[in-house]
Amino acid sequence: MDKSDSATNESDIFAVRLAKLATLCANGKNPFLSNCEQKYTSREAISLFNPANEEQSAVSVAGRIVAFRLMGKAAFLKLLDRDGQIQIYVTKNAIGDQGYAEFVKFDIGDIVGVSGELFKTSTGEITVRANSIVLVSKSLRPLPDKWHGLADSDQIYRQRYLDLAVNGDSRRRAKMRCQIVKEIRKFLWDRSFEEVDCPILQMIAGGAAARPFTTHINALDQDCYLRISHELFLKRMLIAGFDRVFELGRVFRNEGLSRKHSPEFTMIEIYQAYSDYRGMMLLIYDLLQHLCQCVLGTNVVKRFDGTDINLGGEWKVETYSDLVIKLTGNENWFSADKGEKLAFCRKFGLETDPNLEDFEVTQDIYSKLIEPNLIQPTFVTQLPRELCPLAKINANDQRYLDVFELCINGQEIAPAYSEQNDPIIQREMFEAQIGEERQNLDNDFLLAMEYGMPPAGGIGIGVDRLVALLTGAPSIRDTILFPMMRRQQGE
């Protein structure tokens, strides 16, 4: 069936269900109740069954009809609720002629409330024998076919509520995301970190190198930006004496859409005073072990292509320069001129802007040819100082920073720094980064630093990428409940 046939069929079903709705209303029935007693979820109700008892518990459950098998004077239903599915057995004898006549007009997708006693069928399935069933909310449109779900990837993302209603894998992934976020918070709270809320609307977009979204505050008649990072306000909290802080929330970058990128995504940033990037190595390692234990029950996750990723054991540590030299085969790569580096890019078919700075060409090679192949957990350390103005410069080699990028699953999961706390050096590095655009200099942050900021380690974790890793999703769009989509024609 093509899309036009499907749309016509849905339109016909919609018309039939509208007619049913009109009949219900004409008969004085309310097809959209304001409440319904749900004493037990499906899982809770099933757990009450005791094979040793002759009389089983009476339960009240509620959920969406996702399967409906009518057999004359009896029917089996499957109800879906937040915990899963439970089977319902409905007979004319139990609910009466009038009740059964109304019941058989229910549709798949309707939300109903059921009361009755538990029993086990001949096939061994724990079931509710209904003594009452009431329509709670009428479904006017049909759910997608239960066997095939949503086949159109665009529809999966655009109508995520349908995907979640019919696709068990999507529901499990969404629930796992909730568990992961819960356990991240618990892990940090148990280590005396305090969760804070910092501004989303900011006068200066700072803390990362990214293009911001611009908006306008009418009350102040002033342009501002959606934040691209939590960083600079969390560091203000360090200065204020909050030694262990984090924020988990949305950040916004007006850049590309891809398997790894979204203009709106969730990040957690964590800062710990009297620590450094090595302390952050221990923290992220322990955090992932905690998530593996509490959410997954295993240290091995399966990538979308079937590859096993082992998050246990000892993780690799590689320097940025060693990885680049290993790829290029050029021991003198970092002293070579830009022309030689561009020639390497052409040889390997890597499209690189020739106007990039020398270090940016190398970074392009790293991000496109090296990082995608770092599947097993790898700390990439000692990045070039030009890449981040907010980190400590390595005391032994001024060309590098005391940072790492944790790469797993072929992408950066978490960058971390020994945070720069010298306000003089910080100002110099900011000014070198922004050039002549002095209006973008965050003087208030620099002023705060001049009051004294403790040494600290800081880390940012892309939550969507982390969830994709732990659930085996091929794209972060599968982990974001309602990802950004292009507007459809006519909307």
Image: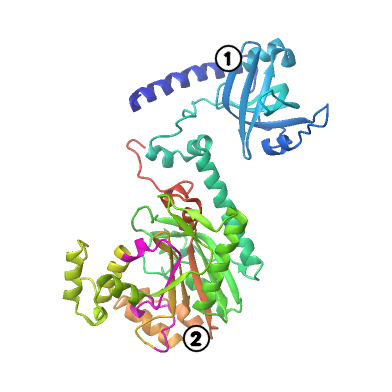
Magenta residues span 370-396
* Near-viewer residue (59 or 299): 299
Disc number for residue 450: 2
Front residue (pair 378, 191): 378
Report how far apart the C-alphas of labels 1 and 2 lie in the structure.
Answer: 73 Å
Tell me which residue sits at (64%, 62%) in the image: 186
Res. 103 image quadrant: top right
Quadrant of the snapshot with the N terminus: top left
Q: Amino acid at mark 1?
A: Thr
Q: Secondary structure at mark 2?
A: loop
Q: Is residue 197 visible?
A: no
Q: Which residue is mark 1?
A: 23
> Left or right: where does residue 295 sit relative to residue 263?
right
Question: Residue shown at 53%/36% (left/top)?
Answer: 165
State the scheme by which the image is colored.
Answer: rainbow
Above or below: residue 202 compared with residue 305: below
Mark 1 and 2 residues: CB-CB less than 8 Å, in contact? no
SS label for mark 1: helix
Name the residue located 51 percent from the left edge and 69 percent from the top edge.
Answer: 314
State yes or no: residue 348 in magenta.
no
Badge 1 or badge 2: first in the primary sequence: 1
